[in-house]
Image: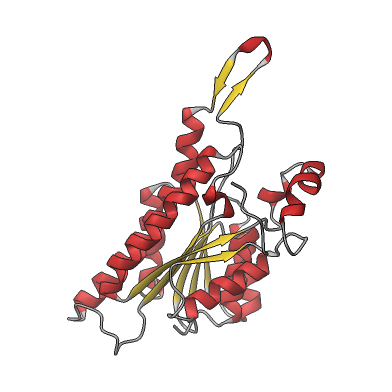
Amino acid sequence: MNIRNKVAVVTGATGGIGFATASKLMEKEIGGLAVVDLSERCEETVKQLNKLAGKEKALPFCGDVTDPEFRRLVFNTMHGKFGAVQICVPAAGIVSDSLAVKVKQGGEIEIYAESVFKKILDVNLVHPTYWAMETIAGIAKQRHAEGRKKWGADEDIQGAIILIGSVSSQGNRGQVGYAAAKSALIAVSSTLNLEGLFHGVQTKIVHPGFVDTKMVDAINDEYFEKNLKPLIGLGRKIQPQEIADIICAMIENPAISGEVWADASMTPLA
């Protein structure tokens, strides 16, 4: 799939993997780009990306990715200005690490808060699932309007969705909610790929290891150096640009399917 002149949506696009991906799409001459984030840096990020492109290609959307009305607003606006969204990278994510069951002083038992668990699932599982489905729906609607039904191998790939998984999908101490969400995304990716191919849309998932982002930087430095860094074969954090390169390769090459592990030769956590 040629990225040039396509229409894309990237959530979590003001930092980390999201910003690196948005920048890479601009380098590859994307036709239109929705920069989606809860951060107020959306406007500033869009100015930076449009300067990189040399023209007005990116639009800012500051809002809650778990809000269905906001999601529909983004897709409808992009469709009205550029056409149906063909590339979706729902990269927004949050963590809230804590042991599933903790024994506190005095023997009091504390269970991971259900409200936090649900929020983790909303952002890391429900949000990417529905932004992916919205992408497929837009392409399906356009094909129907053009009198095209089942996609055929003689046609170009119509769309590509890259979900952001994690090495934590295999289980990770202190991340019961995050690990559950990322593991479930594997099933989402497989299912949406099976269904989406009817309309010519591929859905894939990349599992990054420890990437040099604010999320990973929140880990205590001493703990990371002592307990996590020795697990990484390359002996360093992965750079966001490296993940962005992988995401673009997954978009461009239809032979790449299913799960891609970008863990820098990391030993499984669980």
Q: Residue at x 51, y 33 (%)?
A: 116
Q: Is residue 164 left or right of residue 128?
A: right
Tell me how the rendering is colored: secondary structure
Q: Position of residue 98 (x, y in %)?
A: 61, 33
| The image quarter in which residue 201 lies | bottom left
In the depicted view, which residue is nearer to us: 197 or 36?
197
Residue 171 image offset from top left, x and y in percent? 54, 45
* Residue under the point 48% across and 38% down: 119
- In this view, 259 is above or below 119: below
| Residue 96, quarter of picture | top right
Tell me if I can see residue 64 in this picture.
no
Q: How many marks?
A: 0
Q: Return the x and y of residue 59 as percentages of the image width and height.
A: 51, 66
Name the spot of residue 78 as percent of width and height, x first: 41, 68
Does residue 194 appear in the picture of this structure?
yes
Left or right of 162 in this view: 219: right
Question: Nearest the camera: 232 or 181?
Answer: 232
Q: Nearer the viewer, residue 230 or 38?
A: 230
The residue positioned 59% from the left and 68% from the top of the image is: 21
Q: Residue furthest top?
A: 106
Q: Quadrant of residue 231?
A: bottom right
Q: Is residue 67 above or below residue 201?
A: above
Which image quarter holds the N terminus?
bottom left
